[in-house]
């Protein structure tokens, strides 16, 4: 049994396809298949049911794969220990950022960070909250930037900043004439909201005390904030945007922005790692770079703001 074989079975489990797994591992498919076959022969079990398409782990194979993931994660910590002791920034650092955070935060600091620390190799991915938490717990990523503290006791976090939600209102809407948005003014049939599974949506629905929203945006269930902003600019409905998005708007677009009345819905943006995380040098550089990149007033919760 080798670490390489364990990497191969994790790749097949991820892609559920031997050819795609081989491409990911940068080996030929016959090589990958042969190495997995040898591991199965050594263990005396079948890890994958090859009669199903896509390929699936057998019940015993599922347990082997879960243990393999843990072994590979623990092995990676050995290199992390050495790098941290040497205060080295070398090695790949896998960072996930929520899709409702990344477009507005990353441009503020990422290029400058790369310029100051050329040796950093940060690979950024975008995922929703639930798969992000799972990836952290499985050791598939090193850290994540999400909204609000996770409930999982195996994780730890540092607050980066606090960010208000703002309304983005079409000129034809009645509340466009108002300076402040109150939840009682919001007609859920006029809303453009992200699909279920986005915490951005869940937080706003909770704040506005809407258990369900009539899905008028059925044709846009996979839409992004940017898509919904274009719909509003076209004269149709209301959506919500995060505070950092405002600085990217033109003067004409800013005319569509409306703040909430007190209490102002606000989310806490946090940097999350596992509790056994080791590479604190890189984490601290990221945390400091992000805090420096956001307006000073966003680093603390302001009077009138309410966490959602």
Image (cartoon, rainbow, N blue to C red):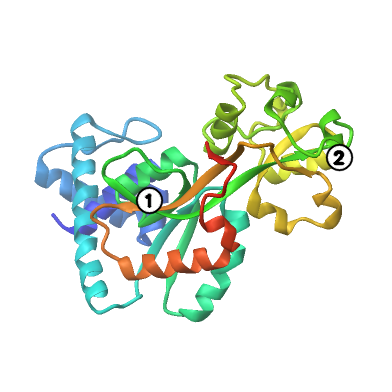
Q: Nearer the viewer, mark 2 or mark 1?
A: 2
Q: Secondary structure at mark 2?
A: loop
Q: x, y (%) of residue 288?
A: 45, 68
The part of the image, by quadrant, that contains residue 5 is bottom left
The part of the image, by quadrant, that contains residue 216 is top right
Residue at numbered disc 1: 21
> Can I make out residue 44 in this image?
yes
Circles 2 and 1: CB distance less than 8 Å? no
In the rendered view, tell whether residue 294 sits above or below residue 243.
below
Category of crowding for the residue at label 2, using alpha-carbon neighbours closer than 10 angstroms: few (below 14), some (14–19), many (at least 20): few
Mark positioned earlier in the residue sequence (2 or 1): 1
Residue at numbered disc 2: 234
The part of the image, by quadrant, that contains residue 14 is top left
Residue name at image x 10 percent, y 39 percent: 44
Residue 112 appears left or right of 73: right
Q: x, y (%) of residue 206?
A: 55, 27
Category of crowding for the residue at label 1, using alpha-carbon neighbours closer than 10 angstroms: few (below 14), some (14–19), many (at least 20): many
Q: CA distance from mark 2 to mark 1?
A: 44 Å
Q: x, y (%) of residue 185?
A: 75, 25
> Can I make out residue 140 in this image?
no
Q: Secondary structure at mark 1?
A: helix
**Which quadrant is home to the N terminus?**
bottom left
Residue name at image x 31 percent, y 54 percent: 30
Most foreground residue, 211 or 181: 181
């Amino acid at each position: 049994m080798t670490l390489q074989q364990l990497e191969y079975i994790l790749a097949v489990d991820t892609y559920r396809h031997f050819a795609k797994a081989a491409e990911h591992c940068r080996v030929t498919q016959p090589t990958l298949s042969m190495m997995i076959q040898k591991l199965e022969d050594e263990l005396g079990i079948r890890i994958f049911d090859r009669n199903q398409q896509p390929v699936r782990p057998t019940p015993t194979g599922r347990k082997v794969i879960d243990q393999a993931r843990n072994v590979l994660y623990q092995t990676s910590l050995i290199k992390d220990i050495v790098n941290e002791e040497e205060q080295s920034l070398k090695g790949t650092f896998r960072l996930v950022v929520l899709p409702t955070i990344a477009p507005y935060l990353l441009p503020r600091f990422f290029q400058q960070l790369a310029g100051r620390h050329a040796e950093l190799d940060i690979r950024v991915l975008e995922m929703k909250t639930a798969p992000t938490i799972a990836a952290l717990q499985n050791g598939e990523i090193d850290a994540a930037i999400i909204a609000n503290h996770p409930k999982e006791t195996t994780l730890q976090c540092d607050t980066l900043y606090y960010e208000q939600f703002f309304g983005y209102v079409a000129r034809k809407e009645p509340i466009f004439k108002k300076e402040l948005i109150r939840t009682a003014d919001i007609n859920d049939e006029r809303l453009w909201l992200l699909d279920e599974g986005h915490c951005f949506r869940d937080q706003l629905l909770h704040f506005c005390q809407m258990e369900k929203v009539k899905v008028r945006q059925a044709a846009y269930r996979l839409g992004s904030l940017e898509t919904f902003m274009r719909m509003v600019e076209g004269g149709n409905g209301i959506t919500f945007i995060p505070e950092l998005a405002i600085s990217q708007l033109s003067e004409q677009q800013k005319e569509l922005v409306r703040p909430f009345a007190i209490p102002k819905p606000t989310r806490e943006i946090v940097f999350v790692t596992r509790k056994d995380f080791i590479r604190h040098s890189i984490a601290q550089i990221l945390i400091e770079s992000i805090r420096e990149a956001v307006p000073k007033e966003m680093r603390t919760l302001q009077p009138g703001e309410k966490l959602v």
